[in-house]
Amino acid sequence: MTVLLFTLPGVEWLTVKKLTLAVDDNSAGYDACAYPYRTSPTNLTQAQMAGVCSSGSGGATSHSDSTMDNAQVYPNQGPYLWLSIGGPGIPVYGVTIEYRRHI
């Protein structure tokens, strides 16, 4: 598993619109998943915003989720992306997070 932190330079806040995972999953027993989270510095909690998994789809495909919970992210919230690769032989080509900036 991998955790990727990202920052919001010069942005007052943003709204996450869509998450897309590009993966080549030929393994029926293992999945690759991506989950964006945001944290709260005041009470040290985290909130999952979405989640998308490959589910052994076979071949190079993209999987998307546009049903966002807790979609607003502010600079003090510490957003990060949790990337989980459940087994061997699942190449992950990339994760795209589409968002709208609020300046």
Image: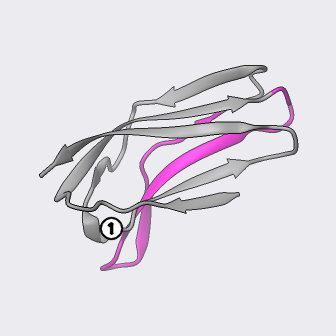
The N terminus is located in which quarter? bottom right
Answer above or below: position of 77 versus 89: below
Answer above or below: position of 60 versus 98: above
The residue that label 1 is drawn on is 77
Question: Is 53 displayed left or right of 85 in the figure?
Answer: left
Report the front residue among 30 and 61.
61
Residue, x 64% and y 42% (percent of image)?
33
Q: What residue range appears in magenta?
A: 26-53
Judged from the image, the secondary structure of the residue bearing numbered disc 1 is helix
Q: Amino acid at mark 1?
A: Gln
Report the front residue among 43 and 34.
34
Q: Residue furthest left?
A: 103
Measuring from the top left, give residue 102's x and y in whole percent. 15, 48
Residue 10 figure quarter: bottom left
Q: What crowding class fits label 1: few (fewer than 14 Cα within 10 Å), some (14-19), or many (20 or more)? A: many
Question: Is 77 displayed left or right of 103 in the figure?
Answer: right
Q: How is the image coloured?
A: one colour
Residue, x 43% and y 60% (percent of image)?
6
Residue, x 70% and y 40% (percent of image)?
32
Q: Is residue 49 magenta?
A: yes
Measuring from the top left, give residue 24's x and y in whole percent. 74, 28
Residue 12 figure quarter: bottom left
Q: Is residue 103 magenta?
A: no
Q: How many marks?
A: 1
Measuring from the top left, give residue 95's x and y in whole percent. 54, 40
